[in-house]
Image: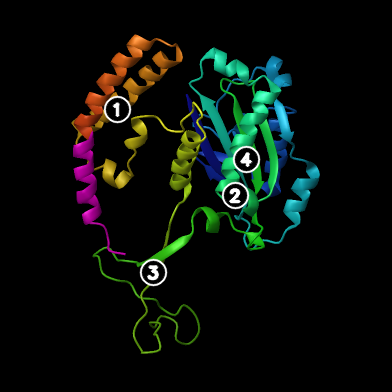
Amino acid sequence: MTCVMRIETINFATLNRGGQSVKGINDGGLYGLMKHNNREEINTSYEVKSKRATNIDTAKSKYNHYFKKLTTLKIEKLKQIPKKKLDTAGAFQVVFDFQDLPEIERAKFFNEDYSKDKAKLILAFLKEQGILEEFELLEMVLHLDEKNPHFHLCFSAFSNSKSKFAYNEFFSPIVDYEPVLDKNGNNIFKKINRGKNKGKYELDEQGEKILKTVPIRKSILQTLQNSFNDFLIKNQTPYRNKKEFTSLLQFPKSVWHKFPDDLKQKIYDIREKEKIMNMQRKKQNKNEYEKSRKELVYLFNDVIIETENIKKITNHFKTPK
């Protein structure tokens, strides 16, 4: 059984994300989220999922659990806090989606005490990671009227320790800087962009030209995912937050484009085979599940050495930091 964690920001300004317009806080985005999560006005554009299209069974909406509700007062207080830029992240959603559940496990979530235990588990993890102390929890709701039971947690992105909106500083802190290169691979130097010396190079105290650099950010989101998986194991839960095989076959575009077509096809085959295996586990078909898992181990071992070699070669030719 899988418990997938996803995080998505809600900016003050409306922006495009994945080809869709996402309403900003200043344009009613949080009000829409509040109404949707409370099932006052259904709008699936506020779903944080790999597929936003979802079927909501309104007959089951009465079973949803509301541990903490987002309110108009909370939204208005958030909007009044000063911010430097309109595209600042003012809030963010964290969703915990319980997937691949046998029917007997899914039914347990309708029990309020059982759901409270799962809510406490989630809050304990977020506290362990420092999120619960750093950001104010505005909402926590469990939806039971869709395919999978899932928790929506909405946080203010205003940092308690920094006294400012600091989503990026927490989840994507700057760890270093790297030089900007031109198309020929040469360093680009900073130039003065105003005043009588406009166009001339900026110089340091020693009279040397100053390199133009860009920040290198460390995303802690992957670390957070790994920590969540470890947390689930440590607390002896039956859930994992990763697919057993395909979670180890995630590649950046720079690496993926280096793969030959036959290797890409093998990875596609593994992903499809794992979907079948998870369905067999869900249906408690033990023999078929074990058979599929053995096949996956064989397929996985066949590609992992080749992908790792290509990753090493690609990383070797990256621009030095």
* In-image side of 62 versus 121 (left or right): right
Point 65% across, 24% down: residue: 114
Range of the magenta residues? 304-321
Q: Are marks 2 and 3 in contact (CB under 8 Å)?
A: no
Q: Check disc 1 and report the residue beneath it.
A: 268
Sequence-first tag of 4 and 2: 4
* In-image side of 16 versus 114 (left or right): left
Seen from the viewer's position, the closer of residues 26 and 58 is 58
Outermost residue on the bottom side: it is 206
Mark 2 vs mark 3: in front: 2
Q: Check disc 3 and report the residue beneath it.
A: 213
Sequence-first tag of 1 and 3: 3
Q: Check disc 4 and report the residue beneath it.
A: 123
In space, the residues marked 1 and 4 are separated at their CA atoms by: 36 Å
| Above/below status of 191 relative to 288 | below
Sequence-first tag of 1 and 4: 4
Point 69% across, 25% down: residue: 113
Q: Residues within 10 Å of mark 4 (few under 14, many from 20)?
A: some
- Does residue 12 appear in this view? no
The amino acid type found where label 3 is placed reads Thr
- Does residue 234 appear in this view? yes
Sequence-first tag of 4 and 3: 4
| Above/below status of 183 relative to 226 | below
Q: Residues within 10 Å of mark 3 (few under 14, many from 20)?
A: some
The amino acid type found where label 2 is placed reads Ile
Image coordinates for residue 13, horizontal then vertical, percent: 63, 51
Residue 131's disc number: 2
